[in-house]
Amino acid sequence: MNRNEQLFAAAQQHIPGGVNSPVRAFGSVGGTPRFFAKGEGAYVWDADGKKYIDYVGSWGPLILGHAHPAVIEAVTRTAQNGMSFGAPTEGEVHIADLLCQMLPSLEQVRLVSSGTEATMSAIRLARGFTGRDKLIKFEGCYHGHADSLLVKAGSGLLTFGNPSSAGVPAAVAADTIVLPYNDVAALEALFAEQGDKIAALIVEPIAGNMNLVQPSKEFVAAMRKLTQDHGAVLIYDEVMTGFRVGLQCAQGLHGITPDLTCLGKVVGGGLPLAAFGGRADIMAKLAPLGPVYQAGTLSGNPLAVAAGMVTLQEISKPGFFEALSAKTQAFADGLNAIGQQLANTKTISAQSVGGMFGIYCSPNIPHSYSDVMNSDRVRFNAFFHAMLDEGIYLAPSAFEAGFVSAAHTNTEIQITLDIAKAVLHKI
Ligand code: PMP
Protein backbone atom coordinates (compact mmCIF):
# COMPACT_ATOMS: atom_id res chain seq x y z
CA MET A 1 0.00 0.00 0.00
CA ASN A 2 1.28 3.45 -0.77
CA ARG A 3 0.83 6.36 1.63
CA ASN A 4 -2.43 7.59 0.01
CA GLU A 5 -3.89 4.11 0.36
CA GLN A 6 -2.70 3.80 3.96
CA LEU A 7 -4.21 7.16 4.87
CA PHE A 8 -7.49 6.38 3.11
CA ALA A 9 -7.74 3.06 4.96
CA ALA A 10 -6.98 4.77 8.27
CA ALA A 11 -9.41 7.62 7.53
CA GLN A 12 -12.29 5.23 7.05
CA GLN A 13 -12.01 4.04 10.63
CA HIS A 14 -13.23 7.26 12.24
CA ILE A 15 -14.48 9.36 9.33
CA PRO A 16 -17.54 8.15 7.37
CA GLY A 17 -16.26 7.09 3.98
CA GLY A 18 -12.87 8.48 4.94
CA VAL A 19 -13.73 12.00 3.79
CA ASN A 20 -15.28 15.13 5.23
CA SER A 21 -17.15 15.98 2.03
CA PRO A 22 -18.50 13.24 -0.27
CA VAL A 23 -17.13 14.31 -3.65
CA ARG A 24 -13.59 13.96 -2.32
CA ALA A 25 -14.07 10.19 -2.13
CA PHE A 26 -13.61 9.48 -5.87
CA GLY A 27 -17.06 7.92 -5.61
CA SER A 28 -17.91 8.08 -9.30
CA VAL A 29 -14.44 7.72 -10.82
CA GLY A 30 -13.32 4.96 -8.44
CA GLY A 31 -9.90 4.46 -6.87
CA THR A 32 -8.12 5.99 -3.91
CA PRO A 33 -8.49 9.72 -3.29
CA ARG A 34 -5.25 11.62 -3.09
CA PHE A 35 -4.36 13.04 0.32
CA PHE A 36 -2.62 16.34 -0.27
CA ALA A 37 0.38 17.40 1.73
CA LYS A 38 1.34 20.63 0.00
CA GLY A 39 0.25 23.18 -2.58
CA GLU A 40 2.25 25.91 -4.27
CA GLY A 41 1.07 28.02 -7.17
CA ALA A 42 -0.49 25.77 -9.82
CA TYR A 43 0.85 22.58 -8.20
CA VAL A 44 -0.12 20.17 -5.45
CA TRP A 45 1.81 17.25 -3.93
CA ASP A 46 0.12 14.17 -2.55
CA ALA A 47 1.07 12.11 0.49
CA ASP A 48 3.41 9.99 -1.67
CA GLY A 49 5.22 13.09 -2.88
CA LYS A 50 3.75 12.90 -6.39
CA LYS A 51 3.32 16.32 -8.01
CA TYR A 52 0.24 17.35 -9.99
CA ILE A 53 -0.92 20.40 -11.93
CA ASP A 54 -4.10 21.28 -10.04
CA TYR A 55 -7.31 22.18 -11.90
CA VAL A 56 -9.56 21.92 -8.84
CA GLY A 57 -8.13 24.72 -6.72
CA SER A 58 -10.05 23.56 -3.65
CA TRP A 59 -13.20 23.59 -5.83
CA GLY A 60 -12.77 27.20 -6.84
CA PRO A 61 -11.47 29.43 -4.05
CA LEU A 62 -7.79 29.39 -5.04
CA ILE A 63 -7.97 31.82 -7.94
CA LEU A 64 -4.48 33.07 -7.05
CA GLY A 65 -3.07 29.55 -6.80
CA HIS A 66 -1.90 27.73 -3.69
CA ALA A 67 -0.05 29.50 -0.89
CA HIS A 68 -0.03 32.91 -2.57
CA PRO A 69 2.57 35.00 -0.67
CA ALA A 70 0.27 38.01 -0.16
CA VAL A 71 -2.50 35.83 1.24
CA ILE A 72 -0.09 33.98 3.57
CA GLU A 73 1.32 37.29 4.76
CA ALA A 74 -2.12 38.77 5.50
CA VAL A 75 -3.36 35.68 7.33
CA THR A 76 -0.16 35.33 9.38
CA ARG A 77 -0.14 38.99 10.34
CA THR A 78 -3.80 38.89 11.31
CA ALA A 79 -3.45 35.68 13.34
CA GLN A 80 -0.86 37.33 15.54
CA ASN A 81 -3.58 39.62 16.87
CA GLY A 82 -6.00 36.83 17.69
CA MET A 83 -8.07 34.31 15.77
CA SER A 84 -11.63 35.24 16.58
CA PHE A 85 -13.56 37.56 18.84
CA GLY A 86 -17.24 36.92 18.20
CA ALA A 87 -17.46 40.71 18.12
CA PRO A 88 -17.12 43.18 15.24
CA THR A 89 -13.68 43.81 13.72
CA GLU A 90 -12.51 46.53 11.36
CA GLY A 91 -11.69 44.12 8.52
CA GLU A 92 -15.38 43.19 8.20
CA VAL A 93 -16.24 46.82 7.47
CA HIS A 94 -13.58 47.03 4.76
CA ILE A 95 -14.51 43.81 3.01
CA ALA A 96 -18.23 44.69 3.09
CA ASP A 97 -17.42 48.09 1.55
CA LEU A 98 -15.25 46.46 -1.08
CA LEU A 99 -17.84 43.81 -1.99
CA CYS A 100 -20.57 46.46 -2.38
CA GLN A 101 -18.22 48.56 -4.48
CA MET A 102 -17.23 45.65 -6.73
CA LEU A 103 -20.74 44.30 -7.20
CA PRO A 104 -23.31 47.06 -7.83
CA SER A 105 -26.31 44.85 -6.94
CA LEU A 106 -25.05 44.66 -3.34
CA GLU A 107 -26.38 47.49 -1.22
CA GLN A 108 -25.75 45.54 1.96
CA VAL A 109 -23.96 42.29 2.62
CA ARG A 110 -23.64 39.85 5.50
CA LEU A 111 -20.67 37.54 5.99
CA VAL A 112 -21.05 33.85 6.79
CA SER A 113 -18.66 30.91 6.75
CA SER A 114 -19.84 28.67 3.91
CA GLY A 115 -21.75 28.77 0.65
CA THR A 116 -24.39 26.57 2.25
CA GLU A 117 -25.00 29.16 4.95
CA ALA A 118 -25.19 31.91 2.34
CA THR A 119 -27.87 30.21 0.24
CA MET A 120 -29.81 28.87 3.21
CA SER A 121 -29.88 32.33 4.80
CA ALA A 122 -30.78 34.09 1.54
CA ILE A 123 -33.75 31.77 1.09
CA ARG A 124 -34.98 32.26 4.64
CA LEU A 125 -34.63 35.99 4.12
CA ALA A 126 -36.55 35.88 0.83
CA ARG A 127 -39.33 33.92 2.52
CA GLY A 128 -39.42 36.34 5.46
CA PHE A 129 -39.46 39.30 3.11
CA THR A 130 -42.22 38.04 0.81
CA GLY A 131 -44.27 36.11 3.38
CA ARG A 132 -44.37 33.24 0.85
CA ASP A 133 -43.03 29.70 1.07
CA LYS A 134 -42.37 28.29 -2.41
CA LEU A 135 -38.88 28.12 -3.86
CA ILE A 136 -37.85 27.46 -7.45
CA LYS A 137 -34.57 25.76 -8.21
CA PHE A 138 -33.28 24.07 -11.34
CA GLU A 139 -32.37 20.52 -12.07
CA GLY A 140 -28.65 19.93 -11.79
CA CYS A 141 -27.97 23.09 -9.80
CA TYR A 142 -26.33 22.65 -6.40
CA HIS A 143 -26.79 25.30 -3.74
CA GLY A 144 -25.24 23.67 -0.71
CA HIS A 145 -26.79 21.13 1.60
CA ALA A 146 -29.65 22.91 3.38
CA ASP A 147 -32.76 20.71 3.51
CA SER A 148 -34.93 22.69 1.12
CA LEU A 149 -32.16 22.66 -1.50
CA LEU A 150 -31.38 18.96 -1.55
CA VAL A 151 -34.16 18.40 -4.00
CA LYS A 152 -33.61 17.44 -7.60
CA ALA A 153 -36.27 16.31 -9.98
CA GLY A 154 -36.27 12.61 -10.68
CA SER A 155 -37.27 11.66 -14.21
CA GLY A 156 -40.85 12.65 -14.87
CA LEU A 157 -41.06 14.68 -11.66
CA LEU A 158 -39.90 17.99 -12.98
CA THR A 159 -42.49 20.17 -11.36
CA PHE A 160 -42.83 19.16 -7.73
CA GLY A 161 -39.80 18.39 -5.62
CA ASN A 162 -38.92 14.98 -4.31
CA PRO A 163 -36.03 14.72 -1.89
CA SER A 164 -32.87 13.30 -3.36
CA SER A 165 -31.25 13.09 0.07
CA ALA A 166 -32.68 10.91 2.81
CA GLY A 167 -33.47 12.87 5.93
CA VAL A 168 -35.21 15.76 4.20
CA PRO A 169 -38.79 15.96 5.48
CA ALA A 170 -41.32 15.63 2.68
CA ALA A 171 -43.04 18.77 3.97
CA VAL A 172 -39.84 20.78 3.46
CA ALA A 173 -39.20 19.34 0.00
CA ALA A 174 -42.79 20.03 -1.01
CA ASP A 175 -42.07 23.77 -1.07
CA THR A 176 -39.17 23.34 -3.48
CA ILE A 177 -40.19 23.30 -7.12
CA VAL A 178 -37.58 21.89 -9.50
CA LEU A 179 -37.58 23.00 -13.13
CA PRO A 180 -35.25 22.16 -16.04
CA TYR A 181 -32.39 24.61 -16.60
CA ASN A 182 -32.73 26.77 -19.71
CA ASP A 183 -36.44 25.93 -20.14
CA VAL A 184 -38.21 29.28 -20.49
CA ALA A 185 -41.61 27.73 -21.25
CA ALA A 186 -41.58 25.67 -18.04
CA LEU A 187 -40.68 28.77 -16.05
CA GLU A 188 -43.46 30.83 -17.65
CA ALA A 189 -46.01 28.09 -17.04
CA LEU A 190 -45.03 27.77 -13.40
CA PHE A 191 -45.26 31.51 -12.76
CA ALA A 192 -48.60 31.71 -14.58
CA GLU A 193 -49.96 29.01 -12.30
CA GLN A 194 -48.36 29.75 -8.92
CA GLY A 195 -46.63 33.13 -9.29
CA ASP A 196 -48.22 34.61 -6.16
CA LYS A 197 -46.87 31.78 -4.00
CA ILE A 198 -43.23 31.98 -5.10
CA ALA A 199 -40.92 33.47 -2.48
CA ALA A 200 -37.73 33.07 -4.46
CA LEU A 201 -36.02 31.66 -7.48
CA ILE A 202 -32.46 30.51 -6.84
CA VAL A 203 -30.15 29.79 -9.75
CA GLU A 204 -26.54 29.15 -10.57
CA PRO A 205 -26.38 31.90 -13.22
CA ILE A 206 -23.71 29.85 -14.96
CA ALA A 207 -24.13 26.31 -13.73
CA GLY A 208 -20.98 24.63 -12.46
CA ASN A 209 -22.35 21.72 -10.51
CA MET A 210 -23.53 19.64 -13.46
CA ASN A 211 -20.26 20.27 -15.19
CA LEU A 212 -20.36 23.74 -16.82
CA VAL A 213 -23.68 24.66 -18.42
CA GLN A 214 -24.32 28.16 -19.72
CA PRO A 215 -27.75 29.75 -19.64
CA SER A 216 -29.38 31.10 -22.78
CA LYS A 217 -29.99 34.85 -23.04
CA GLU A 218 -33.74 34.19 -23.06
CA PHE A 219 -33.54 32.12 -19.89
CA VAL A 220 -31.56 34.81 -18.07
CA ALA A 221 -34.02 37.51 -19.13
CA ALA A 222 -37.08 35.41 -18.27
CA MET A 223 -35.86 34.71 -14.74
CA ARG A 224 -35.43 38.42 -14.07
CA LYS A 225 -38.70 39.48 -15.66
CA LEU A 226 -40.92 36.77 -14.16
CA THR A 227 -39.62 37.20 -10.61
CA GLN A 228 -40.03 40.96 -10.90
CA ASP A 229 -43.54 40.74 -12.33
CA HIS A 230 -44.68 38.33 -9.62
CA GLY A 231 -42.95 39.88 -6.60
CA ALA A 232 -40.57 36.97 -6.08
CA VAL A 233 -36.93 37.41 -5.02
CA LEU A 234 -34.32 36.54 -7.65
CA ILE A 235 -31.31 34.94 -5.95
CA TYR A 236 -28.13 34.58 -7.98
CA ASP A 237 -26.10 31.86 -6.34
CA GLU A 238 -22.64 33.06 -7.33
CA VAL A 239 -20.80 30.97 -4.75
CA MET A 240 -18.88 29.41 -7.63
CA THR A 241 -19.12 32.07 -10.35
CA GLY A 242 -18.56 35.06 -8.06
CA PHE A 243 -15.25 36.76 -8.96
CA ARG A 244 -14.41 33.62 -10.93
CA VAL A 245 -16.06 34.25 -14.30
CA GLY A 246 -15.21 37.96 -14.22
CA LEU A 247 -14.74 40.89 -11.88
CA GLN A 248 -18.47 41.63 -11.89
CA CYS A 249 -19.42 37.98 -11.58
CA ALA A 250 -22.02 36.27 -13.78
CA GLN A 251 -24.50 39.07 -13.15
CA GLY A 252 -22.08 41.51 -14.76
CA LEU A 253 -21.71 39.25 -17.80
CA HIS A 254 -25.51 38.91 -18.01
CA GLY A 255 -26.29 42.57 -17.40
CA ILE A 256 -28.74 41.51 -14.68
CA THR A 257 -29.31 42.99 -11.24
CA PRO A 258 -30.49 40.18 -8.96
CA ASP A 259 -32.32 40.99 -5.72
CA LEU A 260 -29.96 38.87 -3.64
CA THR A 261 -26.56 37.33 -4.41
CA CYS A 262 -24.74 34.51 -2.64
CA LEU A 263 -20.95 34.51 -2.67
CA GLY A 264 -18.34 32.07 -1.38
CA LYS A 265 -15.19 30.33 -2.57
CA VAL A 266 -13.08 33.16 -4.13
CA VAL A 267 -14.28 35.74 -1.56
CA GLY A 268 -12.48 33.78 1.17
CA GLY A 269 -9.32 33.07 -0.81
CA GLY A 270 -9.18 29.52 0.61
CA LEU A 271 -10.44 30.18 4.14
CA PRO A 272 -14.06 29.69 5.26
CA LEU A 273 -15.76 32.90 4.17
CA ALA A 274 -18.97 33.40 2.22
CA ALA A 275 -21.57 36.13 2.00
CA PHE A 276 -25.06 37.03 0.91
CA GLY A 277 -26.33 40.46 0.09
CA GLY A 278 -28.37 42.63 -2.20
CA ARG A 279 -31.27 45.05 -1.96
CA ALA A 280 -31.21 47.15 1.21
CA ASP A 281 -34.99 46.83 1.74
CA ILE A 282 -34.65 43.04 1.78
CA MET A 283 -31.48 42.98 3.88
CA ALA A 284 -33.23 45.24 6.44
CA LYS A 285 -35.42 42.26 7.37
CA LEU A 286 -32.40 40.51 8.90
CA ALA A 287 -31.85 40.40 12.67
CA PRO A 288 -30.97 42.59 14.51
CA LEU A 289 -32.90 45.06 12.31
CA GLY A 290 -35.72 42.76 11.30
CA PRO A 291 -37.53 39.52 12.11
CA VAL A 292 -35.47 37.05 10.02
CA TYR A 293 -32.89 35.38 12.24
CA GLN A 294 -29.41 34.49 11.00
CA ALA A 295 -26.16 34.25 12.96
CA GLY A 296 -22.70 32.66 13.27
CA THR A 297 -20.02 32.32 15.96
CA LEU A 298 -17.23 32.55 13.37
CA SER A 299 -19.03 34.75 10.81
CA GLY A 300 -16.65 37.35 9.43
CA ASN A 301 -13.70 35.55 11.02
CA PRO A 302 -10.66 37.86 10.93
CA LEU A 303 -8.34 35.36 9.22
CA ALA A 304 -10.91 34.53 6.55
CA VAL A 305 -11.63 38.23 6.00
CA ALA A 306 -7.89 38.95 5.66
CA ALA A 307 -7.44 36.18 3.08
CA GLY A 308 -10.54 37.33 1.21
CA MET A 309 -9.57 40.98 1.20
CA VAL A 310 -6.13 40.31 -0.30
CA THR A 311 -7.62 37.95 -2.87
CA LEU A 312 -10.20 40.53 -3.97
CA GLN A 313 -7.49 43.20 -4.21
CA GLU A 314 -5.27 40.96 -6.32
CA ILE A 315 -8.03 40.04 -8.78
CA SER A 316 -8.96 43.72 -9.11
CA LYS A 317 -5.54 44.60 -10.53
CA PRO A 318 -5.72 45.74 -14.16
CA GLY A 319 -5.47 42.88 -16.63
CA PHE A 320 -6.00 40.12 -14.05
CA PHE A 321 -9.17 38.69 -15.58
CA GLU A 322 -8.06 39.24 -19.16
CA ALA A 323 -4.98 37.11 -18.52
CA LEU A 324 -6.85 34.43 -16.55
CA SER A 325 -9.63 34.22 -19.13
CA ALA A 326 -7.17 34.02 -22.04
CA LYS A 327 -5.29 31.11 -20.42
CA THR A 328 -8.49 29.26 -19.59
CA GLN A 329 -9.82 29.84 -23.10
CA ALA A 330 -6.55 28.56 -24.58
CA PHE A 331 -6.99 25.41 -22.52
CA ALA A 332 -10.56 24.88 -23.78
CA ASP A 333 -9.56 25.69 -27.38
CA GLY A 334 -6.69 23.21 -27.16
CA LEU A 335 -8.99 20.46 -25.90
CA ASN A 336 -11.50 21.18 -28.68
CA ALA A 337 -8.71 20.95 -31.25
CA ILE A 338 -7.72 17.54 -29.85
CA GLY A 339 -11.40 16.52 -29.85
CA GLN A 340 -11.66 17.28 -33.56
CA GLN A 341 -8.99 14.71 -34.33
CA LEU A 342 -10.92 11.96 -32.55
CA ALA A 343 -13.85 9.84 -33.67
CA ASN A 344 -17.23 11.17 -32.54
CA THR A 345 -17.72 8.38 -30.03
CA LYS A 346 -14.34 9.07 -28.46
CA THR A 347 -14.31 12.80 -28.70
CA ILE A 348 -14.02 15.53 -26.13
CA SER A 349 -15.32 19.08 -26.07
CA ALA A 350 -14.72 22.01 -23.75
CA GLN A 351 -15.69 25.59 -23.02
CA SER A 352 -14.64 28.27 -20.57
CA VAL A 353 -15.95 31.42 -18.91
CA GLY A 354 -13.35 33.56 -17.15
CA GLY A 355 -11.27 31.19 -15.03
CA MET A 356 -13.80 28.35 -15.07
CA PHE A 357 -14.07 25.54 -17.61
CA GLY A 358 -16.08 22.46 -18.53
CA ILE A 359 -14.70 19.32 -20.21
CA TYR A 360 -17.25 16.94 -21.72
CA CYS A 361 -16.85 13.43 -23.09
CA SER A 362 -19.32 14.32 -25.78
CA PRO A 363 -19.11 15.95 -29.22
CA ASN A 364 -21.44 18.79 -28.20
CA ILE A 365 -21.45 21.39 -25.46
CA PRO A 366 -24.39 20.57 -23.13
CA HIS A 367 -27.24 22.98 -22.40
CA SER A 368 -29.10 21.03 -19.75
CA TYR A 369 -28.80 18.41 -17.05
CA SER A 370 -30.06 15.74 -19.44
CA ASP A 371 -27.45 16.74 -22.06
CA VAL A 372 -24.78 16.32 -19.39
CA MET A 373 -26.22 12.96 -18.34
CA ASN A 374 -25.87 11.83 -21.95
CA SER A 375 -22.12 12.40 -22.01
CA ASP A 376 -19.86 9.34 -21.86
CA ARG A 377 -19.20 8.94 -18.15
CA VAL A 378 -17.26 5.70 -18.49
CA ARG A 379 -14.88 7.42 -20.86
CA PHE A 380 -14.60 10.40 -18.52
CA ASN A 381 -13.52 8.10 -15.70
CA ALA A 382 -10.82 6.56 -17.91
CA PHE A 383 -9.70 10.05 -18.96
CA PHE A 384 -9.64 11.26 -15.36
CA HIS A 385 -7.47 8.36 -14.17
CA ALA A 386 -5.09 8.48 -17.12
CA MET A 387 -4.60 12.22 -16.52
CA LEU A 388 -4.11 11.65 -12.80
CA ASP A 389 -1.43 9.04 -13.50
CA GLU A 390 0.34 11.61 -15.67
CA GLY A 391 0.22 14.26 -12.93
CA ILE A 392 -2.88 16.26 -13.89
CA TYR A 393 -5.43 16.68 -11.11
CA LEU A 394 -8.91 17.25 -12.54
CA ALA A 395 -12.16 17.24 -10.57
CA PRO A 396 -12.96 13.58 -9.80
CA SER A 397 -16.39 13.70 -11.43
CA ALA A 398 -17.89 14.29 -14.87
CA PHE A 399 -20.36 16.68 -13.20
CA GLU A 400 -18.02 19.35 -11.92
CA ALA A 401 -16.54 22.42 -13.54
CA GLY A 402 -12.78 22.96 -13.37
CA PHE A 403 -10.67 25.99 -12.52
CA VAL A 404 -7.53 27.66 -13.74
CA SER A 405 -5.64 29.97 -11.39
CA ALA A 406 -3.47 33.01 -11.97
CA ALA A 407 -0.50 30.82 -11.05
CA HIS A 408 -1.05 28.58 -14.09
CA THR A 409 1.14 29.80 -16.93
CA ASN A 410 0.99 28.93 -20.59
CA THR A 411 3.62 26.29 -19.80
CA GLU A 412 1.30 24.37 -17.46
CA ILE A 413 -1.54 24.69 -19.96
CA GLN A 414 0.63 23.36 -22.80
CA ILE A 415 1.95 20.46 -20.70
CA THR A 416 -1.63 19.56 -19.81
CA LEU A 417 -2.77 19.70 -23.44
CA ASP A 418 0.14 17.53 -24.58
CA ILE A 419 -0.71 14.95 -21.93
CA ALA A 420 -4.44 15.13 -22.75
CA LYS A 421 -3.70 14.52 -26.42
CA ALA A 422 -1.59 11.44 -25.70
CA VAL A 423 -4.11 10.14 -23.16
CA LEU A 424 -7.15 10.64 -25.37
CA HIS A 425 -5.59 8.78 -28.28
CA LYS A 426 -4.69 5.92 -25.95
CA ILE A 427 -7.87 5.33 -23.90
N1 PMP B 1 -23.64 27.11 -4.20
C1 PMP B 1 -22.85 26.76 -5.22
C2 PMP B 1 -23.16 27.27 -6.59
C3 PMP B 1 -21.76 25.92 -5.01
O1 PMP B 1 -20.98 25.57 -6.03
C4 PMP B 1 -21.49 25.46 -3.70
C5 PMP B 1 -20.31 24.55 -3.39
N2 PMP B 1 -19.72 23.90 -4.42
C6 PMP B 1 -22.34 25.87 -2.66
C7 PMP B 1 -23.39 26.70 -2.95
C8 PMP B 1 -22.11 25.42 -1.25
O2 PMP B 1 -20.97 26.01 -0.74
P1 PMP B 1 -20.18 25.34 0.50
O3 PMP B 1 -19.64 24.05 0.01
O4 PMP B 1 -19.16 26.35 0.85
O5 PMP B 1 -21.19 25.16 1.58
Image: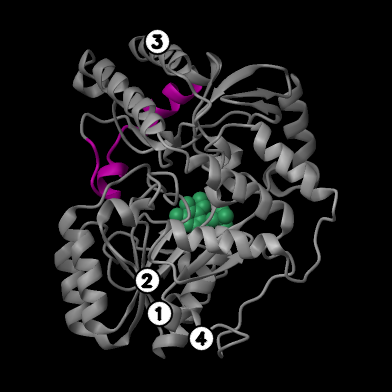
Picture residue at 60% right of the left edge, 40% below the top: 24
Residue 299 at what x, y percent from top left?
68, 65
Of pointers 1 and 2, the one earlier in the residue sequence: 2
Which tag is nearer the camera, tag 4 or tag 2? 4
For residue 421: magenta? no
The residues tagged by marks 1 and 2 sit, at their Cα atoms, a distance apart of: 7 Å
Picture residue at 73% right of the left edge, 70% below the top: 88
Residue wearing tag 2: 161
Question: Cβ–Cβ below 8 Å for labels 4 and 2?
Answer: no
- Give me the disc on residue 285: 4
Magenta stretch: give its range: 365-385
How crowded is the residue under tag 4: few (<14 C-alpha within 10 Å), some, or many (20+)? Answer: some
Picture residue at 75% right of the left edge, 41% below the top: 12
Residue wearing tag 3: 418
Left or right, residue 126 beside residue 310: left
Residue 1 at what x, y percent from top left?
75, 19
Question: Cβ–Cβ below 8 Å for labels 4 and 1?
Answer: no
The residues tagged by marks 4 and 3 sit, at their Cα atoms, a distance apart of: 54 Å
Question: Cβ–Cβ below 8 Å for labels 1 and 2?
Answer: yes
Q: Indicate the amino acid at tag 4.
A: Lys
The residues tagged by marks 1 and 3 sit, at their Cα atoms, a distance apart of: 49 Å
How crowded is the residue under tag 2: few (<14 C-alpha within 10 Å), some, or many (20+)? Answer: many
- Give me the disc on residue 175: 1
The residues tagged by marks 3 and 2 sit, at their Cα atoms, a distance apart of: 44 Å
Q: Indicate the amino acid at tag 1.
A: Asp
SS at mark 1 in the image? loop
Tell me, yes or no, if residue 53 can be seen here: yes
In-front residue for pair 208/299: 299
